[in-house]
Image: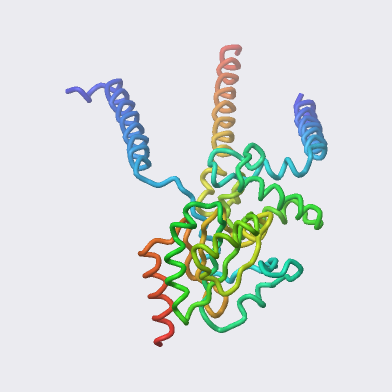
Amino acid sequence: MKIKLVLFIVFNIIFNYNYVYSKNNNLDLHKQISKNIRCIVCQGQSIDESNSDFAINIKNLISAKLEEGLNEEEIYQFLKSRYGEWIVYKPELNINNFILWILPYALFIAGGFYIFTKLIKKKKKININRY
Amino acid sequence: MFLKSRENIIRFLFFLVIFLLLFFLGSIFFKSLNTTKIFVPDKLIGRSLPDFTAESFDDKNKYFTKNEIFNEKKYYLLNIWASWCGPCREEHPILIKLSNDHNLELVGLNFKDKKENALKFLNKSGNPYNKVLIDNNGSVSISLGAYGVPETFLINEKKIIELKFVGPLKNSDYKKILKKINYKNEN
């Protein structure tokens, strides 16, 4: 039973990862980058969604940088060095925002632990009732 | 008493938690009412001016690098402007006043503009700039971490950005710039 469960989880992770990886690779890199950059003159929109002058300039810049041979991370670094970390939607993990990063995982683990202990208690109860 | 039974204590604690949570959220909303939502990128203030190359306004085939533009040991005021931009007209008299200060050199970066319109603008309102450069596609402005026109940078003799002004220069900014350049030169 345990082996089946472990195998299920492992295969699930592998196939999900493969799916996400292939999907990302098929996406147009330019679109992918501009979707992750915040339009700072039209807040609430990404560069990809906006047609403001600033967004058009950034889109042109992304094309130029991709042609120069820069990769996605290097383009983010370039923009971050000019506009700060706020320009990208996915922030880096640092001391100011680590709670935001950790909280979902912590809640997930705590929830899992809670369910696990409940199940064990229930199982014990059933076993006691059986004997 | 009310808190004697266990149920009552739990109920009390429950309402206390709800009250504290609402109070916390309410205070965040209340505080956010008065904070400005306009984002001013200040990443480059206090840092060295990034490298860039820009076309000369006078000669189409001539390009200047950062070191060629800011080649003297003095203060520079880099102003991003365009003839189509209303606030640029508003700040123009301040730029003219600043151009009279011999401790300061003014560099204009003409942003996404037609050359004839830019020339007309300078002829009509006066040319405060020692050097004028062109940014046709906005890439130079992005290299400088700017996001529109007008935007002004005060750059010191070590090519470090000391001050940055988003939007038209005001009289208070004029005083700030003068104070900065003249204070340094007196010492």
Asked where in the image residue A3 lies, by quadrant, the reply is top right
Q: Which residue lies most toward the bottom here? A: B187
**Is B64 or A74 nearer to us in this picture?**
B64
Asked where in the image residue B58 lies, by quadrant, the reply is bottom right
**Is B133 or B179 nearer to us in this picture?**
B133
Q: Position of residue B106 (x, y in %)?
A: 53, 72
- Where B185 sits versus A126, above or below? below
Q: Position of residue B154 (x, y in %)?
A: 50, 70
**Is B8 or B97 nearer to us in this picture?**
B97
A131 lies left or right of A74: left
Report the quarter where the C terminus of chain A lies.
top right
- Residue under the point 64% across and 42% down: A47
- Residue under the point 59% across and 22% down: A119
Q: Which residue lies most toward the top here? A: A130
Q: Position of residue A60 (x, y in %)?
A: 72, 50
- Where B116 sits versus A27, above or below? below
- Colour scheme of the picture: rainbow
Asked where in the image residue A110 lies, by quadrant, the reply is top right
**Is B123 or B7 nearer to us in this picture?**
B123
Report the quarter where the N terminus of chain A lies.
top right
- Residue under the point 80% across and 58% down: A68
Q: How many marks?
A: 0
A102 lies left or right of B175: right
Q: Position of residue B179 (x, y in %)?
A: 38, 75
